[in-house]
């Protein structure tokens, strides 16, 4: 699935991923390939991104924390997420 993470300042990430774990306002949840369409609000926490490989723009690479070779995380204060047709768009603060 395609993941796109956008902040008011810039696009933080765009790429093919295997999973995304998100801090939903009603509890954490994970999205995998072919997940049903969903729209949700996000609270303060960590977005965890699973992928076979990663590529970050130099300007935003310091915002991500490497957990292991196939997982990175991003701290957020709030946001909104939409998944539809195997594309996840996350708007974060």
Image: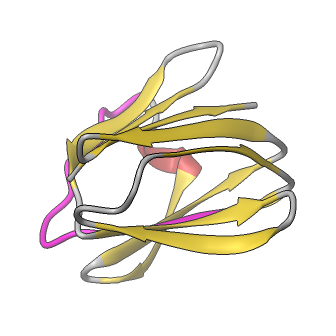
Question: Residue 37 or 80: which is nearer the viewer?
Answer: 37
Looking at the rendered image, the quarter that the C terminus falls into is top right
Q: Is residue 45 left or right of residue 66?
A: right
Main secondary structure of the magenta stretch: loop
Residue at x-position 56% and y-position 47%: 63
State whether residue 50 is above or below residue 24: below
Q: Residue at x 51, y 37 (%)?
A: 82
Which residue corresponds to the image point at 39% horizontal and 57% vertical from the top-left?
Answer: 36
Outermost residue to the front: 36
Residue 55's place in the image compared with 30, above or below, is above
Spot occupied by residue 60 in the image (x, y as percentages of width and height): 46, 35
Q: Position of residue 37 (x, y in %)?
A: 43, 47
Left or right side of 72 for 76: right
Rendered location of residue 39, percent (x, y): 60, 41
Residue in front for this viewpoint, 29 or 8: 29
Against 21, residue 87 (above or below) is above
Q: Which residues are magenta?
A: 46-59
Q: Is residue 8 magenta?
A: no
Magenta span contains residue 52:
yes
Q: Nearer the viewer, residue 59 or 79?
A: 79
């Amino acid at each position: 699935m395609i993941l796109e993470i956008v902040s008011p300042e810039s696009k933080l990430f765009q790429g093919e991923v295997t999973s995304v774990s998100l801090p939903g306002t009603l509890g954490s949840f994970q999205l995998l390939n072919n997940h049903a369409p969903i729209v949700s609000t996000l609270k303060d926490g960590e977005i965890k991104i699973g992928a076979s490989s990663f590529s970050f723009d130099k300007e935003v690479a310091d915002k991500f924390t490497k957990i292991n070779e196939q997982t990175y995380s991003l701290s957020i204060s709030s946001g909104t997420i939409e998944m539809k047709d195997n594309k996840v768009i996350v708007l974060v603060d």
